[in-house]
Image (cartoon, rainbow, N blue to C red):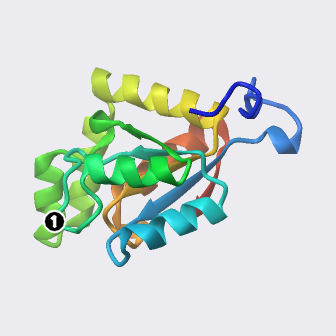
C-alpha cells in the first residue's frame, strides 16, 4: 500500500464533480504477454492496484498465477487484490471455449446479479474510486472477455471512463 501521504485523494465523491474527479478504470489481458510486459504497461498507465477478476487465479502461463503475479506487481510498486466473485463461472468459461460468447455473457450477467458478486462489485467500485485500478484477466481482446462487462457496469453506475491497455 502507498503511504498515506502518497495516496491520491478519492477521485469520486458523488455523481457530479470536476472532470479530474471522474472515475477512470483500466483493463488488461495477459494472454499474449509475459509478466514484465504487462507490468510495464500498468506502470506506464500509472496503475496503483490490479484487481484480478479471474475466478481461478492460477495460470499455465508463467508469472500469472496469483502468488507470482502479486509478487511481481509488489516489486513494481503495484498492489494486488483478487476478486474471485467477479470471475466467470465454469459454465461461462466452457461456453467461450465452445465458441458461444453470447452464452457466456448471459451466464456472467446472471452470476454478476448474485449477492456475493454484488459485494465484490461494490468493493471494486470503492477501490477504483480511491486508486488507479486495472481489471486483469487472461483474454487479450477485451471484446471477448467478461472484464468488459464489468467495465460496462462501472460505466453505467458511475460514469467511469474505461481504458483498455
Q: Is residue 104 left or right of residue 15?
A: left
Rendered residue at 11%/50% (across/down): 91
Query: Where is residue 32, by image quadrant?
Result: bottom left
Q: Position of residue 16 (x, y in %)?
A: 81, 31
With respect to residue 52, does 99 lie above or below?
below
Residue 79 position in % (x across, y down) = 50, 41
- Residue 160 placement: quadrant: top right
Q: Is residue 34 visible?
A: yes
Residue name at image x 70 percent, y 24 percent: 4
Q: Nearer the viewer, residue 142 or 77?
A: 77
Label 1: which secondary element = loop
Q: Position of residue 23 (x, y in %)?
A: 69, 41
Q: Quadrant of the C terminus?
A: bottom right
Residue 165 visible somewhere in the drawing: no
- How many numbered marks, from 0 up? 1
Residue 106 x/y as whole percent: 26, 49
Q: From the viewer's perspective, tell me whether residue 52 is left or right of residue 102.
A: right
Q: In the rendered view of the protein, which quadrant contains the N terminus?
A: top right
Q: Quadrant of residue 83?
A: top left
User: Residue at horizontal 14%, vertical 61%?
Assistant: 95
The residue indicated by pointer 1 is 60
Amino acid at each position: 500500500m502507498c503511504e498515506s501521504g502518497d495516496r491520491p485523494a478519492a477521485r469520486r465523491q458523488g455523481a457530479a464533480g470536476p472532470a479530474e474527479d471522474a472515475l477512470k478504470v483500466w483493463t488488461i489481458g495477459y494472454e499474449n504477454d509475459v509478466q514484465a510486459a504487462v507490468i510495464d504497461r500498468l506502470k506506464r498507465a500509472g496503475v496503483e492496484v490490479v484487481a484480478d477478476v479471474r475466478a481461478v487465479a492460477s495460470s499455465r502461463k508463467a508469472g500469472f498465477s496469483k502468488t507470482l503475479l502479486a509478487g511481481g506487481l509488489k516489486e513494481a510498486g503495484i498492489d494486488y487484490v483478487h476478486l474471485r466473485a467477479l470471475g466467470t463461472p465454469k459454465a461461462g468459461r466452457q461456453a467461450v471455449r465452445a465458441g458461444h460468447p453470447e452464452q457466456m455473457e448471459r451466464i456472467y450477467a446472471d452470476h454478476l446479479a448474485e449477492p456475493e458478486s454484488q459485494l465484490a462489485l461494490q468493493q471494486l467500485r470503492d477501490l477504483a474510486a480511491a486508486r488507479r485500478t486495472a481489471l486483469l484477466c487472461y483474454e487479450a481482446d477485451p471484446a471477448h472477455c467478461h472484464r468488459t462487462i464489468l467495465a460496462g457496469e462501472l460505466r453505467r453506475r458511475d460514469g467511469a471512463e474505461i481504458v483498455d491497455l
